[in-house]
Image (cartoon, rainbow, N blue to C red):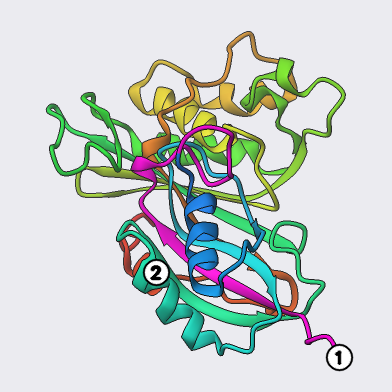
Amino acid sequence: MASKEVRRIALVVEYDGTRYRGFQVQSKGMTVQGTLEDALQGFLGKYVKTQGAGRTDAGAHAYGQVVAFNTESEYTEQVYLRALNASLPQDIRVLKATQVGTEFDPRRNAARRLYRYLVLSQPEPSALWVRYAHHVRHPLDVEAMHRAAQGILGTRDYRIFCGASRFNGRDTVRTMFGVRVWRSGALVVVDMEANAFLPQQARRIAGTLTRVGRGTLEEAEVGALLDGTSSEVSGPTLPAHGLYLMQVVYKDGILDSSSPTGQDFLRETYS
């Protein structure tokens, strides 16, 4: 009997990471990847290994995570979409399902990743934002934060923003294409776009810029951190619950991972 053709399916996944110990499967604790694989196994009747575009931290969220897997099933993409959403918990949703080439790797084929960090800047904390934005009771100078962020763009060694001791002997060079800081009411938004991010890099950049916004770190010191000419340290590493993986951009438009909800979420007001 001839073997069935192997197909590769890519999913665009949105999730509230509050209950999970991150995206990637771990030996202990519930993860987004593990929950997706359980849903696939329940649907297909056998274990299916998945690959994700990024390892979001425990408590972090996503509007456009990309997950791919191989299957010999002949189900259509829409059947996968409906079946998975019928069995997944409400804090994980599959937004799109698309057949891609069997060589597609959601992590290695990614050209850019867009992360967003939310800071709630107001005197008192919010009951509704407590799981989705980091609270700072002090006013923040958003314009100063934005100006300071321009000093860390380009292809650079970002070891200073991830804890150097963890990466001895490993490549810590990345390309930051853009950082924008803007305000939407009481929310201060830090949008970061790079080819890839080191662990905690986005959260530590947001923490460094928040110090600029409070006036406890000079704007010029942010760029000087990368140049090695500053006596300051980066950070702090802000909590993961304010971090969102917004979109993964692929070469040649292989896959559109933009989320309709994510596209409309907090219209930009900074200019």
Residue 263 — which label? 2
Q: Which mark is residue 96?
A: none
- Residue 2's disc number: 1
The image position of residue 265, as x and y in percent, is 32, 63
Q: Nearer the viewer, mark 2 or mark 1?
A: 1
Label 1: few (<14), some or many (≥20) within 10 Å?
A: few
Mark yes or no: residue 248 visible: no
The local secondary structure at tag 2 comes to helix
From the top left corner, tell me how far across and down residue 205 is, in percent: 53, 32
Residue in the image at 40% along x and 56% along y: 15
- Mark 2, residues whose alpha carbon is within 10 Å: few (<14), some, or many (≥20)? few
The boundaries of the magenta stretch are 1-29
Q: Quadrant of the N terminus?
A: bottom right
The first of marks 2 and 1 along the sequence is 1
Q: 232 or 69: which is nearer to us? A: 69
Residue at 84% from the left image edge and 29% from the top image edge: 170
Label 1's element? loop
User: Quadrant of residue 200 in the image?
Assistant: top right
In the picture as drawn, the residue positioned furthest to the front comes out as 1
- Give how far across and how far down residue 268 sits, in percent: 35, 60
